[in-house]
Amino acid sequence: MVGAGIMRRLCLLAILAGTAACMTPAPDLPATPPAEPQTQALPTASPPSAESQRLAAYYERLQNDLLTQGLLRGDGGGPDTQFTDTILARNFIRIALFNEYRDDSDFRTAQSTVSNLRRWAEPIRMQIEFGDTVAFAQRDRDSASVEAYAARLSRVTGVPISFGQPHPNYHVLFLGEDDRRAIEPRLRALIPSISAATVRAIVELPRDQLCVVIGSFDPGQSTYRKAIAIIRAEHPSLMRSACIHEELAQGMGLANDSPGARPSIFNDDEEFALLTTHDEMLLRMLYDPRLQAGMDPATAAPIARQIAREMMAQGAS
């Protein structure tokens, strides 16, 4: 997810504590006080650095600013965002058949380049990892969010997605600033062929780069072998949800953003935070058997237009 925008979700939890008392006789004390039960300290996350705390405050302000502007929508679109089969096909071609960054990019400046169609041809074995500075309560929430969203992606695309399996091939990393700056050994362990430029770009990720996903392919092939999504732990909850939605979907093969895509999360204007019906249609198109991994835009475009016409006709019937 790129740009100066972000996603928010403000959750307000009110805890009402009620107390009541009744008088009962105090029991007789035993002659020898019982031994106090042994308690085991719960594990705690490493404290975030001052820089990480500054980032968290910055992203909180950014999220609030975007919400004030009516952005970070979670409604999936409505009467104000209608689209046709022609628009759907055009958006698919721009998002699925172009890359947002060059392969040697530092992720600082988007530079769209032509690409062949890329997607998964094998089941996805997803694994969620957290940096040491991520609070344990946040880990529980984010794990639940990823698992629920992965189930949705699986339903839409038909690609089996599981957790807890050996040899994971899709890694979702939630990292604080301090965790990410020390992530190089883990990246090289996950993708030994990863370039030095990509490692450096992730370690030195600029503040306006909210989250990122990278994919790994065999030489000359267009089917994913591995993917790594990296999400900043400093984001407020809606921004983290937005990063989960966009990066995990981009890691399915919708690798580009388009300023004309609407209603869509594949647009850096941050209008929508969560996957829309339009975006689900793009994912279904990507995994339609009439399209094949490796197709170039000229080959895939007429097929995509036919699929889009069929989808929109079904929706209108």
Image (cartoon, rainbow, N blue to C red):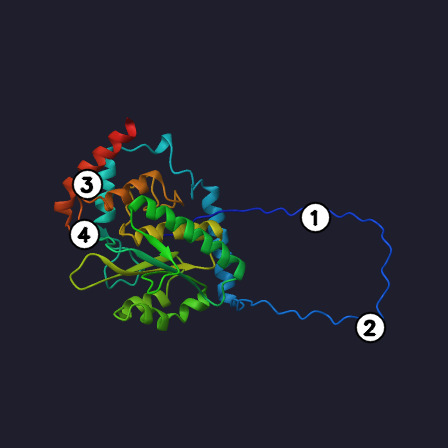
What residue appears at the point 22 percent right and 33 percent down from the top-left corner?
310
Question: Which of the two discs, 4 and 3, labels the residue nearer the N terminus?
Answer: 4
Q: Secondary structure beneath disc 2?
A: loop
Residue 5 appears anywhere in the view: no
| Residue 293, numbered circle | 4
From mark 1 to mark 4, how far is it between C-alphas? 57 Å
Q: Which residue is mark 3?
A: 304
Comparing 10 with 171, the one in front is: 171
Mark whose residue sits in front, 3 or 2: 2
Q: Which residue is mark 2?
A: 32
Dot 2, crowdedness within 10 Å: few (<14), some or many (≥20)? Answer: few
Q: Amino acid at mark 2?
A: Thr
Q: Residue 45, percent across and down?
A: 53, 67
What residue appears at the point 38 percent right and 62 percent down from the top-left corner?
206
Mark whose residue sits in front, 4 or 3: 4
Callout 1 touching callout 4 (CB < 8 Å)? no
Q: Residue 161, percent across and down?
A: 34, 53
Callout 3 touching callout 1 (CB < 8 Å)? no
Q: Secondary structure beneath disc 4?
A: loop
| Residue 17, numbered circle | 1
Mark whose residue sits in front, 2 or 1: 2
Question: Which of the two discs, 1 and 4, labels the residue nearer the N terminus?
Answer: 1
From mark 4 to mark 3, how far is it between C-alphas? 13 Å
Callout 2 touching callout 4 (CB < 8 Å)? no
User: Which image quarter holds the C terminus?
Assistant: top left
